[in-house]
Image (cartoon, rainbow, N blue to C red):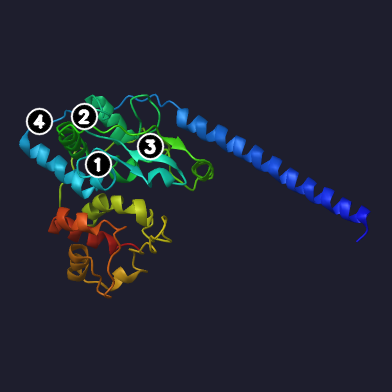
Amino acid sequence: MPNSRLKKLVFRTAGILGSLLVLLLFFYAFAYYQTQRRANQVYALAPQTLRIPEDAASYELGRHVADIRDCKDCHGNDFSGQVFGGKDNPLGRLYASNLTPGKGGLQYTDQDWVRALRHGVGQDGKSLWFMPVQHVSTPLSNQELAALISYLQQLPPVDKVHPTKAFKPLGRVLTFLGKFPMFPAELVDHQATYAEEVKPQVSATYGAYLAITCSGCHGTDFKGGPGRQKGEPVIADLTRTGNLKHWSWGEFRQTIRTGQTPEGRQLSDFMPWKAYATSYQEPELEAIYLYLRTLK
């Protein structure tokens, strides 16, 4: 190839690569701007006023709600929080807050708790980060939310100071593209009202109330899908197009209690079945089973 043609090819290639680099830089700058704007958005809310009970029965109800809504999976057995993925997390420096009143923990009023758990908004009026309130605490009845707050307010103090949360480029881009639910306040209907009380019963209706927590991993349609973390297996389809359609109530119960499916498969630890095995009462599990059996 003559030198002149070679030079033209090199210049053309360099020009294309340079243009792509400029486009990428513009894209990332726009993603940076948009995600920062969303992170800094202030939500002007007037949280509902709940009477936070102090009796022993409400405390036990709050403890049970925290168990079945799997708060400990993120915040730890002592509720002091933990860093997600460690320092090598490619998405950013993310952590579950220290919910106790110890050093580095929360100094929340009743209204602060309601704002956070019902709306996904912190004391500063900005969205919490990566706290799945839409699957865990937003849908709670007023009675159960108040009981949960009562329980959390009485946690023993644990001193644990977490690092400042921060994006890494991958986490910022995935958040911008809507592939990572970083800001829960964006996903909550802040004008919605909630039931004063939801009475436990063995019914599909009550099962739907409980099973919304499962939608955090299995999807709003409960169809499951590919694993989302390194080493996580395929997330099961819990509808009638999955294996569950063949399971009896007894087999479903046995799966949750033992971690062994009727097909002989061991549930992965990515599925917090051990916590569910010790937390859910029989009528609650049966209600969830009845609800899942209605899903097409």
N-term-proximal mark, 1 vs 3: 1
Circle 1 crowding by C-alpha within 10 Å: few under 14, some 14–19, many from 20: many
Circle 1 residue:
140
Q: CA distance from mark 2 to mark 1?
A: 26 Å
Q: Are marks 2 and 3 in contact (CB under 8 Å)?
A: no
Q: Name which quarter of the figure residue 236 lies in.
A: bottom left
Point out residue 88 in the picture as x, y percentages from the top left corner: 43, 46
Circle 3 crowding by C-alpha within 10 Å: few under 14, some 14–19, many from 20: few
Circle 2 residue:
102
Q: Name which quarter of the figure residue 50 lies in.
A: top left
Q: Name which quarter of the figure residue 80 lies in.
A: top left
Q: What numbered label is drawn on residue 189?
A: 3
Which label lies toward us, 1 or 4?
A: 4
Which label lies toward us, 2 or 1?
A: 2
N-term-proximal mark, 1 vs 4: 4
Circle 4 residue:
54
